[in-house]
Amino acid sequence: MAIDFPSHEYGSLSPLAAAAYEQMQATARLVRVALQLEWTIFTRFIVGVIVITLLTVVYLLFTLRKARQPLIIWERLNKPIIKLFRPWIFGRLLAKADPYAESIDLRVATFSKGFCTGFMRDHKRNRNPFKSIHATALATFAETIGGLAITSTLGKKDRAILTSLKMEYKKKARGLLTASSDFTPPQYTVGRQEVQTVVVIKDRMLDTVAIGHFDWAVDTKED
């Protein structure tokens, strides 16, 4: 950014012009050094954030890989920066716990006690001959979301086993789909009891494309 004048022209400048020229050169050098310093600090900061984020993701994937309570995993992923990757990380852990769920492109969007929503993208591998999403893909989507909603209300030693399901198909499913399940748990007692969950699947137009009804055998144990 330095401004160079030929020596013969510089010699012909008045003292005031020469002083102004020297001031311009000094300012240009100062700005250049400041920009280089700021860029170096900014670059180091960005690289540091990326490295820390990657290490944290690896650490969480390793430490949470055997966790059995999905809601606790979801809440532990609620950290700065990591939260941006929470749906993907949770999806990887979910696929490890339930490999069949990986057959659909499922991501959990919101998750709290008794409530879960998620979305599924439309891929060719999940389509039927009629160019809409296959019925079994919709059932897998609904069962996974409903299962998360019910397991979020259980204790560490409790288990929920699917005993029956019924799917109502209202409309051909195409494009991005969302599913939601709002489960109000009963007063659990030690032993086995039957509970039901309902999952509603909608498309981008908010039209209901399918409704899933699921019966679960919940086996609760003393803590």
Image (cartoon, rainbow, N blue to C red):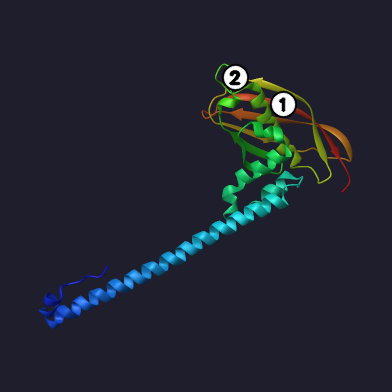
The residue at the point 15 percent across, 76 percent down is: 7
Rendered position, 177 above or below 77: above
Q: In this view, does 197 lie to the left or right of 107?
A: right
Number of residues whose C-alpha sits closer than 10 Å to that of mark 1, classed few (under 14), some (14–19) or many (20 or more):
some
The residue at the point 72 percent across, 50 percent down is: 64
User: Is the residue under label 2 in contact with that under label 1 (CB below 8 Å)?
Assistant: no
Is residue 103 or residue 182 the one in the foreground? 103
Is residue 49 or residue 211 the one in the foreground? 49
Give whichever of discs 1 and 2 has the lower sequence position: 2
Residue type at the position of mark 1: His
Give the numbered dot on residue 164.
none
Q: Which of marks 1 and 2 is in front?
A: 2
Image location of residue 89, percent across then percent down: 63, 46
* Quarter residue 116 falls in: top right
Image location of residue 23, percent across then percent down: 23, 77
Is residue 171 or residue 53 the one in the foreground? 53
Image location of residue 46, percent across then percent down: 50, 60
**Residue bearing mark 1:** 213
Q: Residue lying at the far top in this picture: please name it.
A: 130
Number of residues whose C-alpha sits closer than 10 Å to that of mark 2, classed few (under 14), some (14–19) or many (20 or more):
few
* Quarter residue 31 falls in: bottom left
Is residue 144 or residue 212 the one in the foreground? 144
Rendered position, 196 above or below 166: below
Q: Is residue 161 left or right of residue 48?
A: right
Dot 2 falls on a residue whose secondary structure is: loop
Tally of marks: 2
| Residue 187 appears in the picture as rendered | no
Q: Is residue 101 left or right of residue 203?
A: right
**Residue bearing mark 2:** 128
Q: Distance between the residues labelled 1 and 2?
A: 22 Å
Residue type at the position of mark 2: Asn
The residue at the point 55 percent across, 19 percent down is: 131
